[in-house]
Structure formats: structure tokens, C-alpha cells
Amino acid sequence: MSVFTPFALPVPPVIPDRRVDIRDHGARPGGALLNTRAIAEAIQACARQGGGHVVVPPGIWLTGAIHFRSRIDLHLEAGAELRFSQNPDDYLPAVLSQRGGVMIYNYSPFLYAHRCEDISITGAGLLNGQGQSWWPWKHSQPGMSSIQGPDNFAALRTPLEERVFGTREAGVRPVFCQPIECKRVLIEGVTFRDSPSWTLQPVWCSDLIIRHSTILNPPSLFSHNTDGIDPDACRNVLIEHCVVDTGDDAICIKAGRDEDAWEAGIPSENILIRHCEIRSGHGGITIGSEMSAGVRNLHAHDCTCDGTDTAIRIKTKPGRGGFIKDILIENITARRIRHAAVELTFHYGDTLEKPPDPKNLKHVPAVENILIRNVRCDSAREALHLRGLPGHPLKNVTLQNLEIHAFQNPLREAMETLREERVILHPLASPDILRHPPEIPATVAATRRVADIIEAPEILFPPEKRPMARRRVIPVAPAETGPARLRWKPAPGAGTVRPMSLRIVAAVDERVPHQVDVANAATGEHYGAIDVLYACPGQVFELALTTEQTAASLRDGLSLSVKNGASPLWIVAPGPNAPDAILPQLYADNAPPTLENFLALFCSAASLQPCDWMEICVLDGLFDWAMKGRKDAQQTVFDHLDTFLHPGTGQRENIRSHPCDDEAGGPESTGPFAILAALAPGHPALRFADEGFEKHLRPGTGTIGLNTIVTESNYNIAYPMMMMATEAGRADLRERALRQLEVARERLTAPDDLYLRHFFDTGEKTFRNWSRGVAWYYLGLVRTLALLPPKERPASLVAEAGRVAAWVTRHQLPDGLWPCFLKENDLLPDSSGSAGIAAALALGVRHGMVDASLLPAAAKALDGLMTFMTHDGWLRGTAQSNKRETHHMDIQRSSFRVIAPWGMGLFAQLAAALDH
């Protein structure tokens, strides 16, 4: 079948060989003085001479909107940065623009041309949009309802001269670069970063070339609608050798929306996309959804997509009208696709349960003659999502030579003439891809055997609870109800069996003690028990097996049941957002641990914790390594926050696994908002933390906590409060954060003791010298003060940081760690408390609050903690309880410990603080 006819490449612009330096017209570098007028005068002077190259030399050049003239090349030399002003007034007066397929008057695009010929942006420099000040407008943009709503300007046929925005109140963000009705446009070699909204959106242009350029925008949780390259109703287009890493669609072909587009009647056509690298975003190679004037004759080939929502996406909906036809997409390599590898849908913005609005059925687009071939995808949630509309099917779609690994079955609905030739779909046992899994070293993969078959009794999940991150769960129930069974298929070429440990991971909070009995599934032989005092989501429990038990388990399987209590223990099973590392498995720890293996595991979905004190331990560790430039840490920070806060799909549970999507979840749950405030100080979800602070404010003390103050309030309240104060310039939060620290110092400390909790009404103090409580107190103190300039840190609190440093080092064990309760050296160490204390020590030294002579104590702790590390990166040795009852204390004296991702987060903070 032929759906594609080759077409000629676009004609490049012709620029006269003339150079005009912006410095000759008054431009001054440094990033402080605005150079808008100087750059405009340089362009005008060059244009008066017939055109040429307007040169931006090395340096930082602050500017507002730049407007092109015909035959002008804006050339950025290597080392040059055009830094665009964050003041909206620098993009006035309003100009003719387009947003969402609708023509309007709005703030000028940063780089703007209207009805120009022969224009270009070239060189090796950077165009920095400083979009951080614009992205929060996404959450308050009433003007967009007149563009995107059902009664938009186009639908109402509002005269163009009445479609005027360009105010903060309207909140309609400008586009970064938008030539309109231009001929012969070239963008080559430059880098665009931090766009306010869509990055490159040529409209009604012909002979457009975009090549060897880079677009860098953060993920969509923060940089909303920052599409990469969006040719809109353009003809003769070449996009090649570009790198796009952005917060929305990467390369997206559009053709206007609804009445405006139908009236103009200008389709996007003759488009060639090749040799592009797409690193993140929503859609990789995308068409739509604004395509009302039609898209035809598109050829995309030899591109890669890594970590996008979809690799190939054609999206439209009833009401758009127009057509998408004669499309060839081939030779595409995709990795770690979060949703569908290939999606063709008439249901953009709808769900499977929501039918289209009947009034839109008179303007149903035609999607036909689509050929997709030679596609390889190593992992996706869904292989194919092909969904037409009853009575309006997708027509003449051919899929050739596709090989896709996916978790969910493909969807094919309302298709007419679907041809599939050599389409190979491999089922995935676990959708690691949904949260950027670590690159597991071969030596790690070889020692992990995830259960192939998992069976469990049908038991009603507690209706008041919810599994974190929509993970699938199974119950480990009392034996009389029926055991959970784990089975392993024979491994080809398996060698000598070595002793392995059974691992299971708790899926929801469980505060009733459980004893998990583990037995041979065939013979019933009892292999041992896992003593669960307290299970929190993500906590890993292990039971060591002998060589003989391991061999029998691989042959016969294992049965798991709880002995104590009637309630089941819910554990993670294969399903969404569950990487192999947290599935039921046997593991052989037969190689030395490495920090790199730890970081590979930690920078993944395996470290996800409930959105409370546990997750802030993890987020701080990820953020510390992200700030050191570690890419997987940077991505995982966004992935974790995306899980909790993504519009429409994010969900949060409190410390007891109860849903709390519309609130912070209590004083223990405000910690994660510290990192959200650091990355997106204008994010609307920060109101949950603000509301939580107010709800739990104790009158008369100025502290958060109605009847008590606890050590974790330093870390979970004072620290996020100070971060929000620093990023948003809020003096009220700053003073309240410092007050929280002062009251904690007054009520929780003694000359040689530190208490976890103080009751205001009785004066009682409890949980003396619990190591994790010490870690929270000290880490929160240091991190909060570190957000202030040294001269603004209260002397009393700086002195307290030094006092605690000396106190904890006096009670450090010879192996560098601290026991579950400090000064009670008959108890074995607690790895999470030890990591947190040592991290606070190292950070205190780094920020000048602690004498540098104490830094070796932190380094000694890191060495001691490495002895608790497994080869695949888990950190063992977390104590389960802070209670002093006999049974609990016996366990503290025993070698039984668990793996807790929050302890890994504290260890990551320590390792980052010591990393040079």
C-alpha cells in the first residue's frame, strides 16, 4: 500500500553577507541592563542596508521581545546567551499571535516575525526564556477559556480586534518563537531553554527548516504546555538532527482549530522529520489535536524517543473537522514509554467511559492512509491504542514490522481496513517503565529471581485505604483463609544454587503486628517467619533461606500466611508503577555492594514512599544528587512528585494509607512540599501545606501541633515552611519556621538527652534518645538554617547545631553508627537513624554550622552503613519500632532488621554531602 508521495525539500533563506554587532548599537552584557532597544536598533540598521547577520557576541544579554525584519539572521556566537526578561511589560504592546489554534492579540512572542521573508536564527548560543516566572500562570489563566473553551472566540466568530489579551489578569502566556505568515525560515544550531509555553510555533509559514537545534524544558509538572517544535499550518517543512527534552509534546504538527482554521483553509503539508532525539515529554512524533485545516504528506523516520508518554501519536476529536492523511512514520526506536507506544485516537481529552459530545459529530475529522513501520519499543504500558469513533472509523491504517514490549493488551476500536504485518507484541511481567527504572547491572539482574506466578485468596481490600501509586496488591492472609503462593519457572541454564533470601514489600500501612509464616508450597515444610511489628508502604521484609530451602523453593514454590491476627498483610504484586525490585522475589547477595548500584536503585520508582515524612527523606536525597547533575536523580524527583501531584492522575495517601488528595494529610505530611517549593514556588498544591500549617497551629506558641511538639517537626514543618518562605519571599513563614525550631529546642532537649515528643498540657516527655528522632531533629535544624544567609541565622540555633554535633559524636559506636536508642549500647545499630544523624553532621560542616573536625565522624558512619548494603542497592538495618516493651526491645537486640526506602533517602543525603 502506498500512502506517501515524496516532495521537494524546503528552500533555505538567502541572507546578505553583512554583519552588525549589537554592541555597536548600545547593547551591554551582564544580565542586568535591558537591551531590547539596542537589539531592535541593530536589526533596523541591518534591514535598512538590505539585511544581513545581527551578531550577538559571547556574554549574557538581557532583553525583551525581539521583532524580525526580512532578510535578517539573528546569529548567536558560542558563549552568547540571550536571557529574556521575566517582566511581562517587556512584551507589550500586544501583537497578532496564535494560541491553541486561535488567532488573538497577546503579549509578543519573545522572538517574533510577521509577514517576513528570508529570516533565520543561527549559531551556537543559548536562548533562555526564564519560564519559571511564567509557568505558574497555568493555574490562573481565565483568558484561556476564551481560546480553548467550548464558547471560544473562534466558535463565537468574535472579531479579531476584540480578541485582546496581554494582561497579567488574563494570564495568557506568550510563545517563545513564533513567525507568522513568513517565507523561508531557518533555525539552526541554537539551544532554547525554559520556554514560557510552546517553544517553536511557526504559523502559516512556508519553506521552514529547523535543524541541529536543542530544546530543553523541565517536565510538565512544572513547565506546563512547553511543547518543543509545533509547525502550525505550515508548508514545506524540514526538521532534522534536533534534540528535544521538554514538558509537553516534543514535535507536534498542527493546523489551527475550528472556525479560524476552516476559514483560513491552510493545511500543514509536505513535512519531513528525520534523525531527531526525543528525550522526554508527552508525545514523541505527534499530530494534533489542533488540526482543523488538515495535515497531509508527512514523512518521519530514524528518530528515537526515550521516556515520553507516547512514541507515535495522532490525536484529534469530534468537532475539530479537517483531516489527517498520507502519513508515513518509520524506523523509530522507543524506550521506557509511559503510556502507548503507538496511539491513534479520535478521543483526545476523553476517557473510555466518556462519549463525545453529540453536537460535535457534524465536524468529525477524517484520519486515513497511515503507514507505520519498523518500530522497536523495549517497554510501554500499552503497545497499541487505536481508537476510532463508531460511524467514523480510522481508515486504511497499516502497521508493518513492529516489535513492542508492553504491559497491557492493545486496544483496537472502530477501525476500517487495519493491516498488521509482522507485528510482534511481547507481554511484560512488570511495567518497570512507568517510572524510569534503573539501568540494572547484569550482575544484579542475575542474582534476582522475581516470582513468575503469584496466587492469593480473594479478599476485599480495606475500603478506607488505598495502595500508593495505584500499585496492584495481594493479601498474605491467615492460613485458614488460604495462603499466598509464589512460584518460579525453571531458569534455562541455571547453575549452582546458592542461599537466597525471600523478599516481600508492604503495600499499605499496617500497624498490627503480623508474623508471616513461610513454608514450602508442596510439602508444607516450615522455613521460618518474618516478624512484622509495623509495616509501611514500600518497606521491604526479608527471610534468609538455606541452600536446600532455596533449591526447594525454586522447585516447589513458597506459601505465605499470617499467624497472628485476622487482618491480612497486603504486599506489592506485578502491576503499574511496580519495578522488579519491589516484587516478591528470591535474592542472592553474593557480591560486594557499590554506591553506584545503590544510586541506580534509589533513583527509580523503587524508592517511592507515601507523601509524608518518609518521602521527604527520599526527595531530599534525590534532590541532592540531582543538583550534582545526576540525570536519573533529576528525572526521579519529577517522577515522584508527578505521582502525587500530576493534574488528573496524581494521588496522595497519608501515613495510614488513607486518601488525602485535597489536603496535606496532617503535620507529618508537609515535608515533601519543601522540594515542590524549591522546584516550583508558584505551584498551586503548595496551598495544601499552607492550609495544613494553619489547621494545626497551636495558639500561644506559634508552633504546628495542637497538643504536642515532636522532633520530626523540625524536618517536616520548619524545613518546608522555610523553603516556602525563601522561594516566595514570605516573612511570616520565615518567622514561624524559626519559632518552630526554638520551641523544639526548649521543650525537647536536656543536657544529655533528646526526647521525641513533648505534651504541652501535661509537660510529659517521651521516647528518650530514639536515634531516628534525633536524626529528624538535627537534620531539620541544619537544613532549615542552611536556607538562610549565614548572617541571618539566629545565634542560639547555630549554637544548638554545634551542641548536638558534639553530643551525637560522643555517643557514636566504634563501627561509626548509632544504636536504636542512643547511650544504650546493648542494642544493635539502626541504619536509618544513623544515616540521618551523619547526614546532618556532614551538612552542618558544609554550611559552616559545625566544626570541620567532626566531619570524619560522618565519613566513619558512611563506611559503617556500607556493611548493611546489599549488592543490588538496598540498605538493610532499619529498626522497626521505637517502643520499649519487652518484645520490641528483644528485637532491637536481635539482628532482625528491615529495609526502608526512607533510610535509603537519609543515606543518599549523607553520601551526597560527603561527595566531592
Image: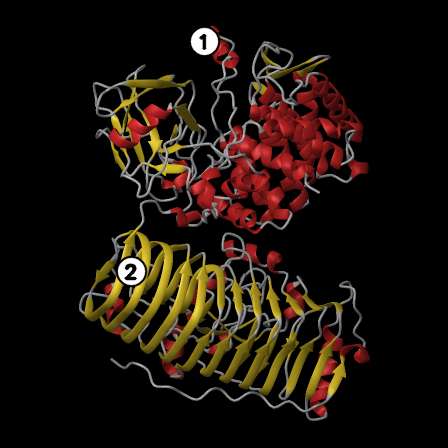
Q: Does residue 456 appear to the left or right of 600 in the view shown?
A: left
Instruction: Name the quadrant of the N terminus.
Output: bottom left
Q: Does residue 554 appear to the left or right of 711 in the view shown?
A: left
Q: Residue 224: x, y in percent?
A: 51, 58
Regarding residue 876, the answer to whether it shows in the image is yes
Residue at image point 48% right, 48% down:
439
**What amino acid is at disc 2?**
His
> Which residue occupies the extreme bottom position in the image?
50
Q: Secondary structure at mark 2?
A: strand
Q: Nearer the viewer, residue 533 or 784?
A: 533
Regarding residue 150, the answer to whether it shows in the image is no
Q: Nearer the viewer, residue 727 or 694?
A: 727
Mark 1 or 2: the one toward you:
1
* Residue linked to disc 1: 887
Label whose residue precedes the other's in the sequence (1 or 2): 2
Q: Nearer the viewer, residue 540 or 508?
A: 540
Asked if marks 1 and 2 touch (Cβ < 8 Å), the reply is: no
Quadrant housing residue 817: top right
**What amino acid is at disc 1?**
His
* Residue linked to disc 2: 385
Mark 1 and mark 2: span between their CA atoms?
54 Å
The count of marks equals 2
> Which residue occupies the extreme top position in the image?
886
Q: Residue 721: x, y in percent?
A: 62, 36
Label 2 crowding class (10 Å Cα cut-off): few <14, some 14-19, many 20+?
some
Report the disc number at residue 856. none
Q: Is residue 170 above or below residue 823?
A: below
Q: Is residue 626 above or below residue 737?
A: below
Q: Nearer the viewer, residue 578 or 360?
A: 578
Instruction: Name the quadrant of the C terminus.
Output: top right
